[in-house]
Amino acid sequence: MKLLYNLGILLYYAMAKIASLFNDKAAKFVSGRKDVFSFLKSRITYNDKFIWMHVSSLGEFEQGRPIIEKLKRSHSEYKIILTFFSPSGYEVRKNYEGADIICYLPMDTSWNARKFVKLVNPSIAIFIKYEFWGNYLSELNKKQIPTYIVSAIFRESQVFFKSYGGWYRSFLHNFKHLFVQDNNSKILLAGIGIKNVSIVGDTRFDRVLAIANASKELPIVKAFKGDSKVLMVGSSWPKDEDFILPYFNEHKNIKMVIAPHEVHESHITDILSKINRPCIRYTKATEEEAAKAECLIIDCFGLLSSIYRYGEAAYIGGGFGVGIHNILEPAVYGMPVIFGPNYHKFREAVEMVKAGAAFPINEGSEFKAIVDDLYDLNSTTLEETSSVAHHFVSSNCGATDIVLDAIFGSKED
C-alpha cells in the first residue's frame, strides 16, 4: 500500500506538470515548488525555533489564522513557517504578515519529507482540517516532533474507516493529539483505536468574530444602504443568479448587494444586463451615486466579510454546485442565511439549519418564499432568526484558546 501511495504522489505531480502547459493554476502549482528548498535555506538561520503550520488552501488558512496570530502574541520566541498545498491559497496569502516564512509544501515523497523536516526542524507541527500526508507525518514522528491536527472533521466515507484502510489509519497514530469539530468524529476515531482526541469545534468561528470586531466602515456601502433593507448575496454563481436577479427586479422594497464568486468582466457585464433597476459597480461608485442606486455589485476581492454588516439577511452561493461558500461571515453579524441544497458536508450549515438560522432551498420558488417572509414588515421571522444566528456564532467561539492551552499546558492570554 505504501508503494502505491508513493507512486500515486509521483503520478499526481507528473499529471500536474502536463496540465501546467495549458492551465495557469497547474503552472503555479508546479513552478511554485521548484525552488522551495533553496528558498528555505536562504531564510532559515541556525538558532531559529519554528512552529510549522500546514494548510491546504484558503479556507483552511482561515481556520489556522487565529492560531498563528495568537501564537505571535503569546509565544514570540517561535517563528512561524506556513505552507500551502494549493495555489488558490498560496497566491492570495503569500504576503501574509503573520507568518515569518510562507511557501508551497513540497510533494509528499519520502525524500522531500526527510529534507524538509531536517531543514525546518520544527519544534511543533500543526496540520489543519484534512491534511494527512503520510511521509511527512511519519518523518515528524521519527524525529519525535509533537504533531497536531486542528479543526479536523471525520466522516465514515473516508478511507481510514474502510476495511482496506489499515495503512492509512497508521497516518493518524503519528499525531500527538487530534482536535476535532464534532462528537461524530470522536466516535469514528475511537472505533479504530484513536483515543487521543478532543472535541473543540472549529477555529473559523474565532476568525469570523475577529473580522467582525475589526471591520471598518465602508462609506460607499453605508451610503448605498441608507435607511433601506438590504439583501446580501455572497459568492454567487450563475445558477444562483438565475432566480435571484428576477426576484430582485420584481421586489422594489429591498436593495441588493451582490458579490459574484467570479468577478471577471464578462460575468459582471452579464449580471448588469439582467438587472432593470438602478445598479452600480463598487469600484466605479461615489457615495452620491451609491446612495441613488438600488443594486451594488462588488467587483473586487477582499471586502465581502466587512460588507455583510450592512445587510439583514444573506444568500450564499455554491450550494447548486460543489458546495456552499463561507456562511459564518454573514452569520457573525446576526444574519439568517439562505443557500442551495449541497450543504450537508459543512457542519456549521447543518447545525445552523437545525437551529433555525439557515434555510436550504432546492429551487427559486423556495428562495422567494423565504425572502418574502424575512423582509415582511409584519413578520417576526427576521428578528427571531437574527438572534439565533448571532447566538450560534458566539456560542461556538473559543476553539483557539482550547487548542493552545492543550499544546502549551497553560491558558493563553
Image (spheres, rainbow, N blue to C red):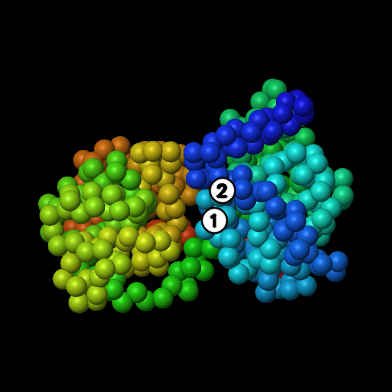
Q: Residue at x 65, y 66 (%)?
A: 99
Sequence-wise first label, 1 or 2: 2
Q: Residue at x 33, y 45 (%)?
A: 237
Alpha carbon distance from label 1 to label 2: 9 Å
Q: Is residue 141 left or right of residue 301?
A: right
Tag 2 residue: 28
Residue at x-position 49% and y-position 38%: 22
Q: Is residue 234 left or right of residue 11?
A: left
Numbered disc 2: secondary structure: helix
Element type where label 1 sits in the image: helix
Q: Is residue 195 visible?
A: yes
Q: Is residue 75 left or right of residue 200?
A: right
Is residue 50 visible in the rendered structure shown here?
no
Instruction: Tell me, yes or no, whether the two marked residues, 1 and 2, touch with CB atoms within 8 Å.
Output: yes
Circle 2: residue type: Lys
Q: Which residue is mark 1?
A: 91
Dot 1 surroundings within 10 Å: few (below 14), some, or many (20 or more)? Answer: some
Quadrant location, the C terminus: bottom right
Residue 226: give its label: none
Task: Examine the rendered structure and indicate whether residue 409 appears above or below residue 217.
Answer: above
**Residue 1, image x, y percentages:** 75, 25
Q: Residue 93, image x and y in percent?
A: 56, 60
